[in-house]
Image (cartoon, rainbow, N blue to C red):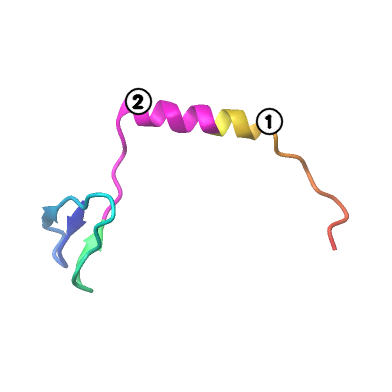
Amino acid sequence: MMVDESEHPKGFLEKGQFKALQSDRVRLQHGSAEEAAVIRAISSSTAGNLTATSGVN
């Protein structure tokens, strides 16, 4: 959601859109339950692939 300098909502930015004014701010919002489930699935599938690195120069 895009808000003005007084935190009043100005609307939502669609994919590929940019804010036009430096005084405007973009506030992130939680996605839907379906989107959250996708992120959790990706995170849990990649978490097992992380390994500790030692001796990195």
Residues packed near mark 2 inside 10 Å, few (<14), some (14 to 19) or many (20 plus) = few
The image shows residue 6 at horizontal and vertical percentages of 13, 64
Left or right: where does residue 56 sit relative to residue 45? right
Check disc 2 and give the amino acid type: Glu
Q: Residue at x 19, y 56 (%)?
A: 2
Q: Which residues are magenta?
A: 27-42
How many numbered callouts?
A: 2
Residues packed near mark 1 inside 10 Å, few (<14), some (14 to 19) or many (20 plus) = few
Residue extending farthest to the right is: 55
CA distance for labels 2 and 1: 22 Å
Q: Is residue 5 magenta?
A: no
Check disc 1 and give the amino acid type: Gly
Disc 2 + disc 1, Cβ < 8 Å: no
Q: Residue at x 30, y 49 (%)?
A: 28
Q: Residue at x 19, y 72 (%)?
A: 21
The quarter of the picture where the C terminus appears is bottom right
13 to 44, vertically: above or below: below
> What residue is pinned by disc 1?
48
Left or right: where does residue 29 sit relative to residue 52? left
Judging from the image, what secondary structure is the residue with disc 1 in? loop
Question: What secondary structure prevails in the magenta region?
Answer: helix
> What residue is pinned by disc 2?
34
Quadrant in the picture for residue 49: top right
Q: Residue at x 22, y 50 (%)?
A: 14
Marks 2 and 1, the one that precedes in the sequence: 2
